[in-house]
Each structure stands twice: as C-alpha cells, then as structure tokens.
Amino acid sequence: MRFDRLPRLLRLSLYALACCVLLYMTLAPDNRVPGSGLIWDKAEHAISWVVLTGVGLLLSTRRRWAIGIFAFGFGAIVELLQATMGLGRDGNLPDLAADIVGIGVAYIIWALIRRAGWVR
C-alpha cells in the first residue's frame, strides 16, 4: 500500500498519533509504562525513534529530510521534559544519542527499501 497517497489530513493525523503514543511512553511515570524495563533503555530509545522516523518517512510525500530533523527535535524536547518534570524519568544525552542512532537506522532502512523498489 502506498501510504503517501492517503489524504494529507489522515497522514498528518496518523503521524500525530505516533508522536502522542511516543510522548506518553517517554513521559509517563516509569511504573505506568507497559513493558518498562524489558529491554535495555538505549535500545528502547533507538527502536522508538526508528519507528517514529519510519512512520514519518512512509507517510511523507516530500522533504523527507525534515522528518529526521523533527524526530531529533522531538527527542531533545523529550529529554528536556524528562529532566525537568520529576516523574521518575531521567533526561540525558546518551538517550538523545540513542534517538539519533534510531533516526539514522530508519533512514538506512528507508534507503534499502527504496532501492528494492518497495516504496517511492
């Protein structure tokens, strides 16, 4: 299915939903997050940002470079909020670095599936 052919409002809504889910998962008190502690923290960050960036790339029609910039900014804001909200979460630079790794992996996967001709 070509997700980039969905109506723009639907694509934006789906991406906003992905952002909201990730925001909840990163800002909810640690004991309320489903599956919290099952995977190493940095892997959780990287996987989350692979998904966020990948969803954005699938839904975008142009300026796909902006998805990565948004994802980075989103990660920086999450880390800042985690550091200042006092809900048992810790904001730190290694987590942001893991987010960046996730963004990079998403772009590598995107390039590979584009090369294979599965998406445009």
Image (tube, rainbow, N blue to C red):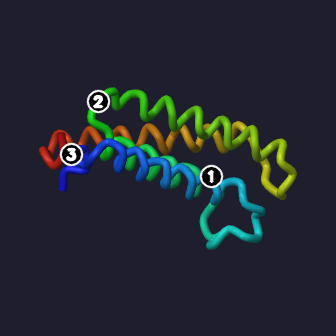
The quadrant of the picture occupied by the N terminus is: bottom left
Instruction: Give the residue at mark 3.
Output: 5
Q: CA distance from mark 3 to mark 1?
A: 26 Å
Residue 38's place in the image compared with 88, above or below, is below
Residue 12's place in the image compared with 31, above or below, is above
Q: Position of residue 97 (x, y in %)?
A: 61, 38
Q: Element under label 3?
A: helix
Badge 2 or badge 1: first in the primary sequence = 1
Badge 3 or badge 2: first in the primary sequence = 3
- Determine crowd level at label 1: few under 14, some 14-19, many 20+ residues with C-alpha closer than 10 A: some
Q: Amino acid at mark 1?
A: Leu
Instruction: Give the residue at mark 2.
Output: 62
The quadrant of the picture occupied by the C terminus is: top left
Instruction: Give the residue at mark 1.
Output: 23
Camera-side residue: 5 or 63? Answer: 5
Badge 3 or badge 1: first in the primary sequence = 3
Q: Amino acid at mark 2?
A: Arg
Q: CA distance from mark 3 to mark 2?
A: 12 Å
